[in-house]
């Protein structure tokens, strides 16, 4: 199966009367933005549309009220079409994968991941920073109105998946998409404030404690930070608040690899790795049964803290 043209996708969208929209489990800003923008656009043009996701949207996206529209269960199974957004493969839709595979109607797959398996009857898969870039193109082409609410949802995905317009794949088209959404009323300041300039007090205190213990190894080419159960208990922070910690050590000049370790329980550490490009951290994580991407990977390691740091440090050294 291969890609369909933009016209084929929009013609199919205009034909259907009802659709269920799926995004991937543990949804991010792009998955939610793309799915909800499509849901609202279909509803605004008189169709029935429901967005389903295995997990509830994280609290940080709550500033956009459309997040309340995400359902965790399918209340009705009579639809003309299933539309999957931001899902590289069927397994990523989680609990709904079985329903998807038994569905006899039209299936449309819209995604920006290069690894996408083109699993839909119709597919619109193009590599770019965000699924929301593709969704904007599709909604405009299909003649749907981009309301202020839809513009905010699409801008959320564009901003979060492009790392605030800094990733390598950000193109002229990405900025043109952003310009169009801004013209339709997207509030860039509001989205940035909620995504990047706001955190609970516990996170800020934990951040200070963890960064204060940062270590430099391999002639300052490897930086390691550790969040212990004691750090979490002392600051009252939930472990989910450590998201993004791993990025800070990588900003240090000369550091090629950043490793963030989190003590899950005694003698068990969840490891996140980031690379500036010289080291393939997917290879490092894979040697411990984990994996991910060349520049961002993860794995789980058992043992005493110093022992685990030695193992990781040696594995990074071998890939330097
Ligand atoms: Mn995405």
Image: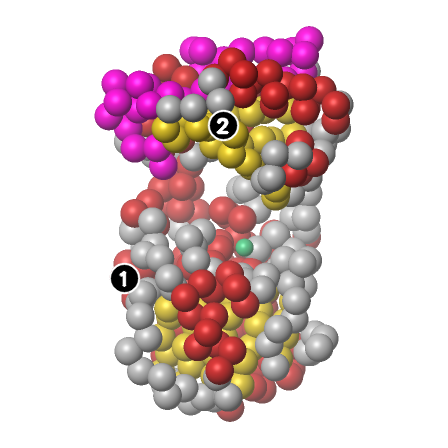
Choose the circle earlier in sequence order: 1 or 2. Answer: 1
Magenta highlight range: 211-240
Mark 2 C-beta to ligand 1 under 8 Å = no
Q: Which residue is mark 1?
A: 68
Residue at the spot 70% in from the left edge and 36% down from the top edge: 283
Does residue 216 appear in the picture of this structure?
yes
Q: Position of residue 55 (x, y in %)?
A: 35, 57
Residue 58 located within the stretch drawn in magenta = no
Neighbor class of circle 1 (other Cα within 10 Å; few <14, some 14-19, many 20+) is: few
- Judging depth in this view, the residue of 273 and 27 nearest the camera is 273
Residue 166, which numbered label?
A: none
Q: Calculate the distance from the C-alpha at mark 1 to the C-alpha at mark 2.
A: 39 Å
How many numbered discs? 2
Q: Which residue is mark 2?
A: 302
Taking the image as shown, residue 75 lies to the left or right of residue 315, namely: left
Q: Position of residue 155 (x, y in %)?
A: 47, 54
Residue at the spot 64% in from the left edge and 83% down from the top edge: 8
Q: Is residue 12 above or below residue 174?
A: below
Residue at the spot 27% in from the left edge and 61% down from the top edge: 68
């Amino acid at each position: 199966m291969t890609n369909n043209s933009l016209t084929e996708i929009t013609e199919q969208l205009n034909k259907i009367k009802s659709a269920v929209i799926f995004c991937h489990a543990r949804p991010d800003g792009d998955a939610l933005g793309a799915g909800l923008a499509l849901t609202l656009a279909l509803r605004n043009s008189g169709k029935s549309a429901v967005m389903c996701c295995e997990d509830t949207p994280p609290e940080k996206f709550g500033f956009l009220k459309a997040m309340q529209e995400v359902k965790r269960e399918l209340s009705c199974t009579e639809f003309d079409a299933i539309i999957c957004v931001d899902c590289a493969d069927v397994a990523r839709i989680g609990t709904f994968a079985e329903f998807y595979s038994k569905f006899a109607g039209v299936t449309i797959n819209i995604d920006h991941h290069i690894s996408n398996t083109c699993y839909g009857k119709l597919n619109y898969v193009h590599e770019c920073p965000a699924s929301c870039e593709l969704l904007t193109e599709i909604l405009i082409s299909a003649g749907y109105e981009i309301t202020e609410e839809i513009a905010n949802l699409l801008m959320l995905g564009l901003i979060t998946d492009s790392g605030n317009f800094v990733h390598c794949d950000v193109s002229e088209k990405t900025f043109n998409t952003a310009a169009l959404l801004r013209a339709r009323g997207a509030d860039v300041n509001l989205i940035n404030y909620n995504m990047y300039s706001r955190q609970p007090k516990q996170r800020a205190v934990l951040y200070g404690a963890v960064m204060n213990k940062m270590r430099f190894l391999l002639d300052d080419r490897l930086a390691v930070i550790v969040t212990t159960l004691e750090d979490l208990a002392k600051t009252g922070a939930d472990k989910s608040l450590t998201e993004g910690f791993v990025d800070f050590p990588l900003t240090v000049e000369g550091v090629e690899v950043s490793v963030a370790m989190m003590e899950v329980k005694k003698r068990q550490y969840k490891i996140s790795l980031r690379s500036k490009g010289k080291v393939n951290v997917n290879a490092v994580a894979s040697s411990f049964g984990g994996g991910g991407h060349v520049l961002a990977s993860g794995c789980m390691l058992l043992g005493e803290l110093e022992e685990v740091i030695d193992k990781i440090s040696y594995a990074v050294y071998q890939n330097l």
